[in-house]
């Protein structure tokens, strides 16, 4: 799909979305709080194609992690639901692997053992040699074979994040869920890891949902950027199709007119249409001017 001509690749994605690989329907969630239920999300509807790379972007606190956690099965939606390949999602499962921002490696296990643990849990029935080969293959994918015997405390933040990605990939998930996977990294490390993720996505074709605050990262990596309104009762405000040929090169993108138009569209959404994050009242008055006025509730 990735190497097809642009038009047919877009059509293939559109067709695949209709085949309902991953679908969020009318998803809403109320969290109990001392002041009563807090509606964090409302009416979130999204169809994602197999192999599609989707970014979620929106201001802090709008509900991005909550969406991801519902798809991961870590939170249960209060209304609506998530379907993955005709099965309702209501618990965590190895077909939906999560990479968290703060690389959650087990500190007492080596890099190798951290990945091996995930492999042993998800690939029962494999013999020792097969497990070893698979762990090494996944460490190779993220260029971490050289540090296989090191402990997490002996490697850098970027390397830990690579191991987290290897661990998730080793589970051969249908869907890779990443919550700000590069948020804590310096710009150069971040760029290297973004390139690795693009290469891996091109070769494995996993479906990916990634949360990011970084507009350039969203445009560079995504097939679509899902932009969320500010909460409470946050929902999807706009969806931007990123019609840029792959493989994408960050240096070439800097001069690419379409790339810059996409960037501009996301920035406009975040800093004009959804700029007032502090005061809900102001956000509502902004919304009433634009096309996102459809769904704000009084759930404050
Ligand atoms: N367990 C919970 N109980 C009550 N409220 C919660 C709970 N989890 C999240 N929330 C609220 O739901 C809203 C969405 O939170 P969420 O963590 O999804 O935001 P986010 O978009 O991921 O933010 P950030 O970009 O800062 O990570 C926030 O207002 C948050 O306070
Ligand atoms: Mg979050």
Image (cartoon, rainbow, N blue to C red):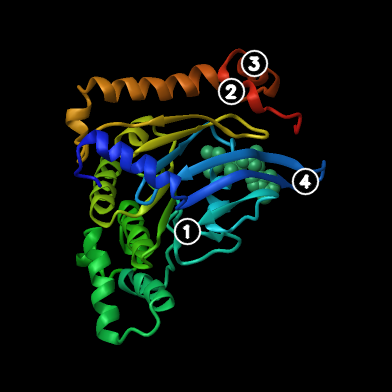
Spatial CA span between label 2 and label 3: 7 Å
Residue at the image point whose x is 48% and y is 51% from the top: 22
- The disc placed on residue 33 is 4
Q: Using the rendered view, name the quadrant where residue 28 is placed.
A: top right
Total number of numbered labels? 4
* Percent x, y of residue 245: 22, 35
Earlier sequence position, callout 4 versus callout 2:
4
Earlier sequence position, callout 4 versus callout 1:
4
Disc 4 to disc 2: CB gap under 8 Å: no
Residue 180 visible in image: no
Q: In this view, does 283 lie to the left or right of 262?
A: right
Residue that label 2 marks: 292
* Percent x, y of residue 174: 40, 60
Residue that label 3 marks: 288
Question: Measured along the vertical axis of the image, is residue 84 above or below residue 245?
Answer: below
Q: Using the rendered view, name the quadrant where residue 189 is placed.
A: top left
Earlier sequence position, callout 3 versus callout 1:
1
Spatial CA span between label 4 and label 1: 34 Å
**Tag 2's secondary structure?**
helix
Residue that label 1 marks: 85
Which callout, 4 or 3, points to the residue nearer the camera? 3
Earlier sequence position, callout 4 versus callout 3:
4
Disc 4 to disc 1: CB gap under 8 Å: no
Spatial CA span between label 4 and label 3: 28 Å
**Tag 3's secondary structure?**
helix
């Amino acid at each position: 799909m990735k190497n097809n001509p642009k038009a047919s690749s877009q059509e293939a994605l559109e067709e695949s979305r209709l085949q309902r690989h991953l679908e969020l329907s009318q998803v809403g969630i109320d969290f109990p709080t001392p002041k009563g239920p807090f509606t964090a999300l409302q009416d979130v509807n999204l169809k994602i194609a197999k192999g599609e790379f989707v970014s979620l972007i929106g201001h802090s606190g709008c509900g991005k992690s909550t969406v991801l956690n519902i798809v991961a099965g870590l939170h249960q939606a209060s209304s609506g639901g998530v379907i993955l390949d005709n099965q309702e999602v209501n618990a965590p499962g190895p077909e939906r692997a999560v990479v968290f921002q703060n690389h959650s490696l087990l500190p007492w296990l080596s890099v190798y053992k951290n990945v091996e643990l995930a492999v042993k849990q998800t690939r029962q029935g494999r013999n020792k040699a097969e497990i070893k080969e698979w762990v090494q293959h996944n460490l190779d994918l993220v260029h971490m074979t050289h540090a296989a015997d090191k402990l997490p405390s002996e490697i850098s933040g970027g390397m830990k994040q690579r191991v987290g990605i290897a661990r998730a990939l080793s589970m051969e998930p249908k869907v890779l869920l990443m919550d700000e996977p590069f948020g804590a990294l310096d710009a150069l490390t971040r760029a290297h890891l973004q390139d690795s993720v693009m290469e891996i996505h091109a070769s494995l074709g996993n479906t990916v949902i990634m949360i990011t605050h970084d507009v350039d990262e969203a445009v560079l990596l995504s097939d679509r950027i899902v932009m969320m309104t500010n909460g409470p009762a946050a929902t999807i405000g706009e969806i931007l199709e990123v019609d840029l040929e792959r493989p994408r090169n960050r240096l070439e993108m800097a001069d690419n007119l379409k790339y810059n138009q996409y960037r501009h569209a996301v920035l406009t959404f975040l800093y004009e249409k959804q700029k007032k994050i502090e005061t809900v009242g102001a956000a509502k008055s902004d919304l009433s001017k634009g096309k996102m006025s459809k769904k704000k509730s009084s759930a404050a």
